[in-house]
Structures are given as structure tokens and as C-alpha cells.
Amino acid sequence: MHSNSEIGDTLLTEIVSRRWARFQAARWPSGEVQAADLQARKVVVDTRTVSGWRQGQLPSNKHKLQLIRAGFKSMLDRAYEPAEAAGRMADLEAQVETQKAAAAAAERELALIRKALAGFSDDLEG
């Protein structure tokens, strides 16, 4: 059985993959033209790699760096935008959970102090 996190990660990867493939198809009419353009810009790729990218295979970190140096950072940013948003959302959710835990601890401490103070009021009555 898969966890919700695994399903979410798979879905997110599929979204990024589709966006990556779509952006390339919009930029270059074919894999051969794309490979030639990228090679002219000092990105070390062959037509097989480019074909994989055009089918949605995501680039390696090495290729990402080369693409950024070649001026394609905005294309990468747009393709990976959903993953970045999901990361920001996960960070915020973690912060909320931390704050909830801190608030619960403060409420427990406040209850103990109230209980201790209630014992002092018994001293005043006696």
C-alpha cells in the first residue's frame, strides 16, 4: 500500500515531467533542432537524451546546471514550479505543526499553574 506522501510525490513528478516536455515542444520543433541548439550553447547532450526530455524524462543535475548556464533557467523554473510550491507548502505545514505543539505545551503548563494557584486559595479560606 502506498502512503499519501508517495502518491503525492508521484503525482507531482508527473506534473513536472509533463510541463518539462510541453515547454520543450513549444520551444523547438524537433529533438534534432533542440539538440543542435543546445550543443551550440555548450550543453552536452545527444539526440537520445533530448528525446527522453521531450517525452518527459527530467534532466540530471549536471544537465540542469548546463541548461541554466545556457540561459534556460526560466524554462526549468517554470517546469519545476509546482514542486517548489509544494515544498513551500510543506515547510509552512511543518511550521504550523510546531506552533501547535508549542501552544499545547503552553496550555498544559498553564493548567498546572492554575491548579497550583487553586491550592493557594484554599490556604486563604482556612
Image: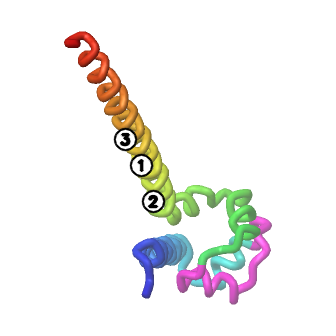
State the CA–CA distance, disc 3 to disc 1. Answer: 10 Å
Q: Is residue 98 above or below residue 53?
A: above
Point out residue 94 in the picture as x, y percentages from the top left corner.
46, 51
Point out which mark residue 22 bears: none
Q: Which residue is mark 1?
A: 97
What amino acid type is highlighted by mark number 1?
A: Glu
Q: Is residue 81 above or below residue 98?
A: below
Point out which mark residue 86 bears: 2
Can the viewer see residue 26?
no
**Quadrant housing the N terminus:** bottom left
What amino acid type is highlighted by mark number 3?
A: Ala
Can the viewer see residue 58?
yes
Q: Are marks 1 and 2 in contact (CB under 8 Å)?
A: no
- Residue at 64% of width from left, 77% of height from top? 34
Query: SS for tag 1?
Result: helix
Report the mark closest to the observer, 3 or 1: 3
Q: Which residue is mark 3?
A: 104
Based on the displayed image, in which of its 4 quarters is residue 68 positioned?
A: bottom right
Residues 46 and 110: in front is 110
> Mark 1 or mark 2: which comes first in sequence?
2
Report the mark closest to the observer, 1 or 2: 1
> Mark 3 or mark 1: which comes first in sequence?
1
> Mark 2 or mark 3: which comes first in sequence?
2
- Residue at 43% of width from left, 53% of height from top? 89
State the CA–CA distance, disc 2 to disc 3. Answer: 27 Å
Q: Are marks 2 and 3 in contact (CB under 8 Å)?
A: no
- Residue at 76% of width from left, 68% of height from top? 62
Judge from the rendering whether residue 58 lies leftward or rightward of residue 112; answer left or right. right
Q: Estimate how packed mark 1 is, as few (under 14), some (14 to 19) or many (20 or more) residues with alpha carbons within 10 Å.
A: few
The boundaries of the magenta stretch are 39-57
- Taking the magenta stretch, the answer to whether it contains residue 49 is yes
Q: By what rule are the colours in the image chosen?
A: rainbow
